Image (tube, grey):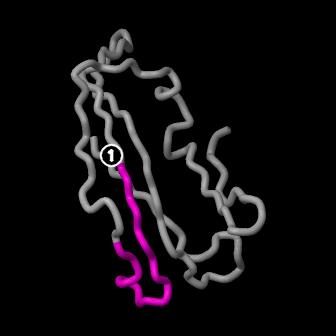
Amino acid sequence: MNDNFYPSVTWAVPVSESNVAKLTSIYRDQSFTTWLVATNTATSEMVILQTIKWRMRLGIEVNPSRPLGQRATLQEPFAQEQPQVLSKNEPIPPSALVKPNANDAQVLMWRPKDGPPLVVIPPKYR
């Protein structure tokens, strides 16, 4: 399995008719739990082999007036925490086995300095 974390961010205000770059910073702090399981194909029974927890933190400053390739500067952290393989497995919650998964449940919100927040991209499933 190859599960790459690949977030993307828009340069412009997502609720504007303009595509002028106005992004000034990005802050993310996400934590994940992943299970390595073996499944009996005859009975569909799952056996948890390992539980792994990890966290991705990111702080980036953006100067939209600079040329592409020079706009973003990593602020923190310069090294990510290593994934933790737990010594005791955690059970898989039933909600982790059915839709929506994390990618389908994500929402893009625009939170302007003035005015109410706006859902730009709703989740695929509700």
Say above or below: 105 vs 20.
Answer: above
Which residue is at the far right?
Answer: 115
- Classify 10 Å Cα crowding around label 1: few (below 14), some (14-19), many (20 and above): few
- Give x and y (percent) for residue 46: 34, 16
67 part of magenta stretch = yes
Residue drawn where x is 43% and y is 73% of the image: 61
Residue drawn where x is 70% and y is 56% of the image: 119
- Give x and y (percent) for residue 53: 32, 35
Q: Is residue 111 left or right of residue 57?
A: right
Residue closest to the eye, 118 or 24? 24
Residue drawn where x is 72% and y is 59% of the image: 118
Quarter of the picture containing the N terminus is: top left
Residue closest to the eye, 21 or 37? 21
> For residue 37, what is the image quadrant?
top left
Residue drawn where x is 54% and y is 75% of the image: 23
Say above or below: 31 vs 112.
Answer: above
Say above or below: 50 vs 112.
Answer: above
115 part of magenta stretch = no
The residue carrying mark 1 is 3
> For residue 67, what is the image quadrant?
bottom left
- The residue type indicated by label 1 comes to Asp
Which residue is at the far top?
Answer: 43
Q: Is residue 97 left or right of residue 75?
A: right
The secondary structure type at the circle numbered 1 is loop
- Give x and y (percent) for residue 5: 37, 52
Q: Is residue 14 left or right of residue 114?
A: left
First to last magenta residue range: 56-73
- Give x and y (percent) for residue 9: 50, 66
Quarter of the picture containing the C terminus is: top right
